[in-house]
Each structure stands twice: as structure tokens, then as C-alpha cells.
Amino acid sequence: MSAATLEVKQVTMRFGGLKALAEFDLTMMPGELVGLIGPNGAGKTTAFNAITGVYQPTEGDVLVAGERVNGLKPHQICVKGVARTFQNIRLFKQLSALDNVRIACHASCKAGFVDTLFQTAHHEDEERRILARAEEFLVVMGLGHRRDELSRNLPYGEQRRLEIARALATGPKVLCLDEPAAGMNSAEKVELMKLIRSIRDRFGLSILVIEHDMKLVMGVSERLIVLDHGVTIARGKPEEIRRNPKVIEAYLGDAYLEEKHMAVPAGGEAP
Amino acid sequence: MTEFLQHLANGLSVGSIYALIALGYTMVYGVLKLINFAHGDVYMVGAFAGFYLAQVAGIGVYGVEASGGAQLLHAILVTLGAMAICGLLGYTIERFAYRPLRHRARLTSLITAIGVSLLLEYGFQLKPWITSPIEFPPGPTFRVFPTLVERVPLEGAERAVGVSLSNLDVYGLLVAVILMVVLQWIVYRTKFGTAMRAVSFDWQTAGLMGIPVNRVISWTFVLGSALAAAAGIIQATSRPKIEPLFGLMPGLKAFVAAVLGGIGSVPGAMVGGLVLGLAEEYVAGYTDSSYRDAIAFSVLILVLLVRPSGLFGRVTQEKV
Amino acid sequence: MRAWPVVKSFLPFLIGAPLFWVFGEWLPGAWNLIFLTVFVNIVLAVSLNVVNGFTGQFSLGHAGFMAVGAYTAAKITQSMEGVQLSFLPAYASDHVVFALALAASMATAALAGLLVGLPSLRLRGDYLAIVTLGFGEIIRSIIENMKALGQATGLSGLPPRTTMTWAGLCALGTIVMARRLATSTQGRALFAIRDDEVAAEAMGVDTTGYKVRAFVISSAFAGLGGALVAHAIMLCTPKMFTFVRSIEVVIMIVLGGLGSITGSVVAAVVLTVGLESLREFQSFRMVAYAFLLIVLMLTRPQGLFGTHELWDLRIFKKRRAPAPAGAKEAP
């Protein structure tokens, strides 16, 4: 159909009686930077989980490069081209930075157990290729000097960058970053913004970012989607979203709106 | 028909034993998310505790001397004594082997639990160090549990429906049911029970709400161990040969029962135990009884393949 | 040429075989059984480590797979006894048959591992322990009921085929297998599963598939160990393969450090030789083991070696080329 890398069509997630995500729609083209924002508990990570296969969507479809992926297991969806980072950083703590990234190259490895046990030339070739690839990604993310360091010993900011390097190494079409700037100071956030844009430029991926830091996400995204209690309450360019009263209400509450004479009367239009 | 009813009676007896032991597994798993490998051995210790208490008090050791009422009183006292001893044992195990590891990986506690289990099983198999007033440890050969209550076959049941039952079977079932009812009351109608359930949902939040988590966990172990002890004594009165490894199989089967009912669920453990007991009786009764033990494991595999959360369990999603 | 690396991969065995043979000849007879046991325990411990240590899945059913392998090999050597491959001298013929028996034992044990692993490995850690324990018992109870396998008395009078060379080669083979696995893509996938299954899955690792594969490999080598034991003591009974046996292997890898091949080897040697004196007193030995486990978990749960290996020491590391220019590239 289209050249869209990711199409999320009316995806709904229900947990028992709770509708965590309601009719979520999203289409992404290669090279697009989209931000997903909303107050805590809005369903942003749930959307990620539904896209990457951690949850199976109760309703709706997820398509990657035109191919339906909902119902597949997470590792299969990864192979189809979707990579992600996690809100709480899930690195392989007992492994080095290099090994963390090498694991992401796993699915592309064409040598199997037999090759490993008998140390065939095929095995050696693949190991060399994976090593080179992993080292390259470490260097791209500025972590070349940390290659043999245990991932749990890395400073926080570098751990976040390592997670991104790892996700990149899977060779995705779509990269989903879950709060990549959490816990960083302003200088680090500026660096991160530049990094995300450079990744997009260099690899031509679609990048979907969940973030709480407004400045960062508005600075990095070309367009935004705003969730609140699982419902999409606004979409558009950052400037439009900034002024949207429904968005402001979701984050700051009615009282703020009334104060600013921006409250929407019941059934009425926004000023 | 007679055979059917006989299996029913036997199945309920066996099942109530499994239920009592399963309750301990399920309660501990509920609050600590730990499979207490040593629990089956607490059941064994319970039987031996009763054995030693009766010896020391001179009850039933040389045959049954006292009259009907006194018999029952003695039996009840011995049972309560054994329950207290095992309650203490359960407390000690939790306090010194599990609590220090609560913040570590779950695997560490699991390995420790295996260690405690081995300690009890093989510690009891050592040759006796003390010989008076009791021989302890009991050593590997089996001992004969004293007759606390004289066995009286119930002629009425035999004549009416052809089922062979004795007063011991009835008492055993009665005690089991009473204990289960009491436990049900504790868990659902007392403040302690509510605290226990709160801890099983989320021990950190429960602690923040002012619940004394350590105390609740300790008492959970005490309760579970006491029930296991009672089960041990009930079993030993109908099958008096006891030895240090005789808790192994019932322990494993009771675990299966707990999983069947939904591990973490108190009513689940009771139902699971009874269902497993009946299943075992019926399948072993109508087919080849040499595969009796395999039935429990087959049930386990079936449950884990088809419905891992068990009959009454909650299906939990890991938060990513 | 492309085949050279595979040929090279057999080198350790070509070197090891004569060394083990010489060792076996030189060793005084009284020590024979002890060292055979040490080598067998290395096979068992290192293979169990692949599942429990590398992949982080706690299996307690190793003895069941030992039994499968032992009985398979026993049936083969028993039925081939007296048969001689015409073109070989008796001695060589016997060992060729034994080699086949060993290969068969690995195959059947691997199959058993597949059947047990497929349903079980979808379960979480604690459940897996009991399920594998249960399977071990089921396998044993099946064997105890089969007339063809001698029921409770088992099979006796097996030919004493386990020489120091065989045992040594198998131990070496297991270590080599584990090492190659640990330094490969597949091994890293197992470590990833151990560290964080969700993240591993998200990075493209088929976690269930890999867990099953690790389990199958581990079971195959357990079968090998079982076959070696049976042909060392010339006996094969169900009582040899109870859950106590499984737990003994678990204790070895816990002591050595879950995930460390070096640790498993060292612990196997230490426990086999050290507790040799307590061999007669099963209860004392088990109580000692029990204390060991509890104290170890309370004081040093990572065991002797944690996840470290002998070959991680700096003296073994190849000198790396200095980091390429631009290594600190940042946007």
C-alpha cells in the first residue's frame, strides 16, 4: 500500500474492565519524528507495548511496512523492524556494553548452534561481522570508550544512550523511545535532542518518542499526539498543541484554564 | 457403586490432607512469592513431634488404656502440641533462612529453601544423639506412631453402603474441615487476615500503610506450619509408619494441589487438595495403581499447560 | 581453506585423548573411581550450568535425563556384548560400540529434554523447578515399572567401558561445548534471557525457543554423564537417579557460581574429592550439603566464582589494538 513504515489503526487495549488505550491511530513515514505526550497514566507506554507485541491489541491492527504484526510475538515484531527502549532502562546488567549491543544483532545472525559447536568458518565470519557492527553503533552513540565496561557500571546518561545504541543495532524501520531523557540534566537533554535528530538523518528511520519534558519533545518532534486516559485528545504541530486548551486542561486542570479565560464552556468551541 | 463410594471416602480423606498442606504453600507463596520447599518436611516434623510428645507423656505408647473421652482429649492435646512445635519451626525457618534474603533475587531464596528441606530430611535420618527421654534424631528406619485413639470400624457404613470406614477416618476429616473453616475465618474475617491479603498483593505498599509486614509474614508461616503438623498427625493416626522422608511425596502433591487451585488463593488450595485427592483415588482405583504418584504430576503438567493460574488464581500481567 | 576451522575445533580432543590415557595408566588403582567420578561430575555440572547458569532457568530434573542416557547406553552395550565388528580387533570394536552407545544416550536424553522442556519452559522460575523435579520422578517411576529395563533391580553386569580416556574426553568435550557456547551469539542470547527476558524478547531473541534449545543441549550431556556412570560401576538402577542426584549437581554449580564454567569444574572436583570420605554416610553428606547451601546463600550467593571465568583473567586476553581514531565520536 503506502510507503508508511508504521500504521496503527484503531488500536484499543482493554484490561478487564479498564480501557487503557482507546482507538489509537498513528501513521508514520520514513524519517518522521513524532512525539507522544500526555499526563502520567495516559496510556503512552501501553501504546508502545501494543505496537511492539508485549500486549496483544484487544482491537485494531498494527502494520509495519504494510505487513500486519499484531498477534506476533515481540521478537518476531522486532525482526519485522520495530525496536524500542524502556521507561526504566532494561539493559542486560551483567553484560558489557559491547555485549548488550551484540545481542541486538542476534536475529540477523545466520550461523546457528551447530556452527558454534564446531566453530565453522561461517560462525567466525558472523562473529566478526557482529562485532564490527556492534562497535560501530557504540561509536555512533559516543560509547566507543566504554565497550568492555559492565553496563550496570555506566553512568545514567550513558546507560540511556547504550539502550538506544542497542535498539539501533537491531536495524529497525521504526524506533520507539520511551522517555529517553528521564533523569537527565538540561545540557544532556540538549545533546540527546541533537542525537535523536542525527540518528534520524543518518539512518532514515521513523522515530516515535514518549517524553514528559515539553521543551525537548516539542523541539525534536515534527508533530505530536496527545493522550489522556487512553484517549487521543489532540494531534498536530508543536505550535498548535502548545496552545490547545484541551491539552492544557489535561496537564494543568480546569482551574488554570479558567484563570486564563480559556475554559471551554460545555458543548462550546475553544476561544 | 460401593467401589465408587469407597473411593469417594478415601479420596476425601487423602484430599483433606493435601488441602491442609497446600494451604501452607499457598499462603507463603501469596505473601512472599516463594515456594517453600521445606513445607512438606514440616508435615513430617509434625508427625514426629506428635510421636515424641505421646512418648514423653506416655500416651498410647503401650496400647490404648484411657477411656473414650480421655482418648480424644489426649489426641487433641498431642495434636495441638505438635502444631505449636511446628509453628515455632516455621517461624524459625522464615526468620533465619528466608528473611535475610528477602531483598535478593528470588532464586537465592529458592535455593535456601531446598537447603532447609534437605536439612530436615537428612538431619532426621542421622543416628540418634540423645536416647532419653526420646531418641532424637529418629534415624532412617521408620517408627510406629502411637495409637492415640482406638480404631473402631464403622459397622453402620459397612452394612448400609458397603464402604469400610473407621472412626479415625471420620475424626480426621472432621479435624481437617474444622481447621479449614477456622483458617477461612482468619483470612477473611479478621484484621490479621486482611493484613495478610494486603501483603500478598503488594508488600511495599502494605508496609507504607502501617501494616507490620515482618510480623504478618512470620505469622503466616506459623499458621501454615501448624496446619501441616495437624495434617501429619491425622495421616499418622491412620497410617502409623512414619519416617523422615515420608513428607516428600505428600509435599510435592500438595504443591500440585495448590497450583491446581491457583497458587496464592486460600479457597483454591482447599478445593485443589480435595480435587487432587479424589482424582488420585479414582484414577488409581480404576486403572493401574502403581502409577499413583504420576497422576499428581500429570495434573500439574496439565494445569500448567492449559491454565497456569489455576482454578481460582489471578492472571497477572508483568508491567513493562 | 574453509574446512580448516572445523578441523581445528577437534584439536583439543586429539591432544586430550593421549594425555588422559597416560593419566589413567599412571594413576594408582585406588584413585581410579574417584577421578572417573570427578570427570563425570564435571560433565553433569557444566551441562546443568548451561540451563541454570547461562539461561537462568532453574531445573531440578537432571537426574531424569541421566537415567534416560544410562539405560539407553546400557541396553546397547548389553545387546552388543560378544558381538565383534569383524574388521576390528576386540578391543577397538568394544570401544566403537561404546562410542555409538554414548552417542545414542545423548540422542535419547536430548529427545527427553525436548519433551520435558517444551511445555515447561513457558513457566516462570519457581514453577520450573518443581515441574522438572516432577518430571525426573516420572521418568524414574516409568523406568521402575518397565520389565525390559529390569524394573527396580535395574540392569547389572554391564561391561566396564568407562575408561579414564573416555571420561576425560567427555569432561573436556562438555567444557569445550560450554565455552564455545558462552563466547558465541547463541550464548549471549542465553545470557540476555537470564538478565532480562522482556528486553531480550524485544531485541529479537526467541526466548522460549532458546530456553528449549539450552535445555535440550543440557539434557543430552546429562545423558552422556549417566551412560558413563553406568559403565563405570557396571550397574544401572533407578535408585541411582533420584532427585538427590539432581540436587547434588545443583549444589556443585551453586557453589562454583551459577554461570561460571570454571566454577562448576572447580566445585565438581572439590566436592567429589572432599566429600569422598563421607561417601559411606549418606545422611551426614546430605546434612553437610544442606548447611553448605544455606550458608552459601546467606553469605555469598554468587558462589566461588560468580560469573567469572579462568579465561577472563588479563593474562589470557589477547592484546587489543588501540581504539580506532574517532572512537569518541559524538553528534
Image (cartoon, coloured by chain):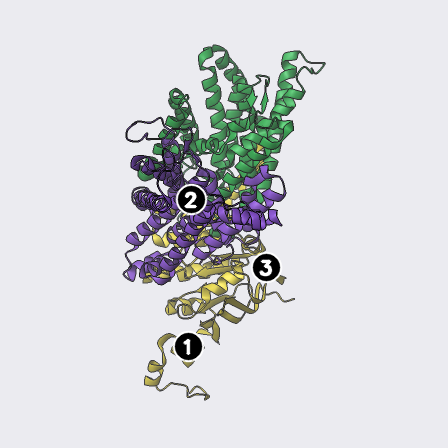
Chain colours: A yellow, B purple, C green
Residue B234 numbered tag:
2
Residue at 47%, 22% (x, y): give it. C37
Report the amino acid beneath label 1: Val
Quick one: SS at disc 1? helix
**Label 1 vs label 3: CA separation?**
32 Å
Check disc 3 and report the residue beneath it.
A71
Compared with A149, B177 (above or below) is below
Residue at 50%, 66% (x, y): give it. A16
Quarter of the rendering containing residue A86? bottom left
Task: Give the chain of mark 3.
Answer: A
Q: Position of residue B19 (x, y in %)?
A: 46, 50
Depth order, front residue of B109/B260:
B260
Q: In the image, which is nearer the foreground, mark 2 or mark 3? A: 2
Quarter of the rendering containing residue C298? top left
Check contact, mark 2 vs mark 1: CB within 8 A: no
Is A212 on the left-hand or right-hand side of C20? left
First of labels 1, 3 by sequence position:
3
Q: Position of residue C66 (x, y in %)?
A: 54, 30
The crowd level at tag 3 (other Cα within 10 Å; few <14, some 14-19, many 20+) is some
Check disc 1 and report the residue beneath it.
A247
Quick one: SS at disc 3? loop
Q: Are marks 2 and 1 in one subunit?
A: no
